[in-house]
Image (cartoon, rainbow, N blue to C red):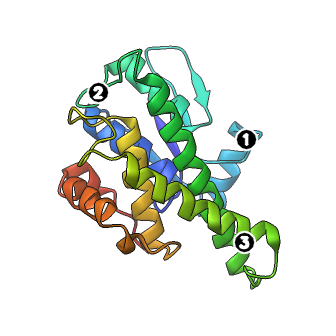
């Protein structure tokens, strides 16, 4: 697998963590370079990362979304330490991931607007994006049972999504995660896992 993206992207980080946990090597191609960006644009009409290019013994595939890439890795190599929800619980995991991705995308948009020098309080749209982040993270805290979204302890994609979202918020100073004690405890509970430490975003 060739994985295209940046080391600071939380979406790319999810794929990196899953690959590490499954023991699957990959080549990382930074799209922060002109060469990496050009290669990404040749592979994906979306020009978005993560993008993964699979070659080798199986069919050649180019996949464009972190969830799609992770699902494909699971189909090839099993789920490793990640637990999938039961059919009765799968709706809850999908809701959690959808909500957290919405908060993450809102925070990323605000980051880019901020870098462009825009006043984030000058637009009703931008204010709503900021409020969405707080709404989702407050809700996520209410759904936690310790280090899991389910009463039985587990590490699944909902938990990985929350961890990468929280780490991004702290790293980019997008939201005061520290005001949510249960979210802080959740971060601490997973922070010593080798794949988590190894992929923590750096400037």
User: Which numbered disc, 2 or 3, marks the residue that appears first in the sequence?
Assistant: 2
Residue 197 position within the rendered picture, expressed as x and y whole percent measured from the top left: 25, 59
Give the number of the disc on residue 42.
1
The residue tagged with tag 3: helix, strand or loop?
Answer: helix
The residue tagged with tag 2: helix, strand or loop?
Answer: loop
Mark 2 lies on residue: 83
Question: Based on the displayed image, in which of its 4 quarters is residue 65 positioned?
Answer: top right
The residue tagged with tag 1: helix, strand or loop?
Answer: helix
Dividing the image into 4 quarters, which one contains the N terminus?
top left
57 over 43 or under it: above or below: above
Residue 161 position within the rendered picture, expressed as x and y whole percent measured from the top left: 43, 46
Marks 2 and 1: in contact by CB < 8 Å?
no
Give the number of the disc on residue 127.
3
Q: Is residue 66 visible?
A: yes
176 over 37 or under it: above or below: below
Question: Based on the displayed image, in which of its 4 quarters is residue 87 positioned?
Answer: top left
Marks 3 and 1: in contact by CB < 8 Å?
no
Residue 27 position within the rendered picture, expressed as x and y whole percent measured from the top left: 42, 43
User: Which numbered disc, 1 or 2, marks the residue that appears first in the sequence?
Assistant: 1
Q: Nearer the viewer, residue 198 or 37?
A: 198
- Residue drawn at (29%, 66%), measured in percent from left and top? 181
């Amino acid at each position: 697998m060739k994985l295209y993206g940046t080391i600071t992207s939380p979406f790319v980080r999810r794929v990196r963590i899953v690959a590490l946990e499954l023991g699957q090597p990959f080549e990382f191609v930074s799209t922060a370079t002109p060469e990496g960006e050009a290669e990404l644009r040749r592979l994906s009409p979306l020009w978005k990362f993560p993008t993964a290019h699979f070659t080798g013994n199986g069919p050649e595939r180019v996949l464009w979304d972190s969830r799609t890439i992770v699902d494909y890795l699971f189909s090839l190599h099993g789920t490793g330490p990640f637990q999938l929800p039961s059919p009765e619980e799968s709706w809850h995991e999908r809701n959690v991931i959808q909500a957290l991705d919405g908060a993450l995308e809102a925070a990323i948009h605000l980051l880019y607007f901020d870098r462009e020098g825009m006043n984030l309080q000058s637009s009703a749209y931008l204010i709503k994006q900021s409020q969405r982040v707080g709404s989702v993270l407050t809700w996520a805290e209410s759904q936690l049972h310790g280090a899991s979204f389910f009463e039985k302890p587990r590490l699944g994609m909902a938990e990985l999504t929350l961890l990468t979202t929280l780490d991004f918020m702290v790293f980019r100073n997008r939201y005061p995660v520290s005001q949510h004690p249960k979210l802080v405890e959740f971060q601490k509970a997973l922070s010593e896992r080798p794949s988590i430490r190894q992929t923590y975003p750096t400037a």
